[in-house]
Amino acid sequence: MRDVTELIEEVVTGLEFELVTVEHSPRGRLMRVFIDIARGVTVDDCATVSNQLTRVFEVENIDFDRLEVSSPGLDRPLMKAADFERFAGQEIRLRTSVPVDNQRNFTGVLLGLRDGAVAVDTEKGELLVALADVEKARLVPKF
């Protein structure tokens, strides 16, 4: 059987959206698919992707109880290297997997990627964190 996440990515990118992430419940009964597009995700976009995925899952015999498709929200997670480039200049919250100067949580302006490291301008100065050491990163919504 094909990897479900790869299959979802193929469908989502085929519809010209970006796959942000896929979440599965412990037994795989619920699948949450987060999509994005530069113009912003609409309810119709979610319905389109959901309908297409449902048809593909039927053909591929992928068993699930519920499928949810949505936008990543204003506090969008940053997961891929391209995300850290695309959202440079925006404020982020970042959690590292290992402490940096006895600290794991940081907030600052994302400067982008430098030699495989995420660069963030924090109140204590510039922080460089290897991409592999980023446990979680999210945009900070502006209201």
Image: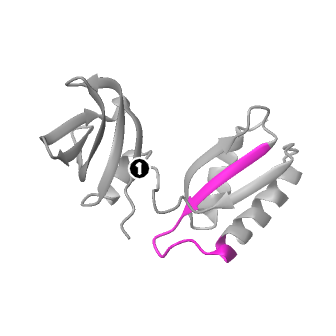
Q: Classify mark 1: helix, strand or loop.
A: strand
Magenta segment includes 94: no
Instruction: Tell me residue 97's x, y (percent).
Output: 38, 26
User: Residue at position x 32%, y 51% from top?
Assistant: 92
For residue 87, side relative to residue 73 (left or right): left
Looking at the picture, how far across and down is residue 8, in whole percent?
68, 51
Task: Specify start and end residues of the magenta stretch as a single range.
Answer: 30-45
Depth check: 125 or 3 in front?
125
- Residue furthest left as drawn: 125
Foreground: 59 or 33? 33
Quarter of the figure with the C terminus: bottom left
Per the image, the residue denoted by label 1 is: 138
Point out the residue furthest to the front here: 143
Q: Quadrant of residue 55?
A: bottom right
| Residue at x 87% of width, y 52% of height | 59
- All told, the count of numbered labels is 1
The x and y percentages for residue 46 are: 68, 68
Which residue corresponds to the image point at 29% horizontal and 56% vertical from the top-left? Answer: 91
Image coordinates of residue 69 in percent, x first then y, are 68, 59
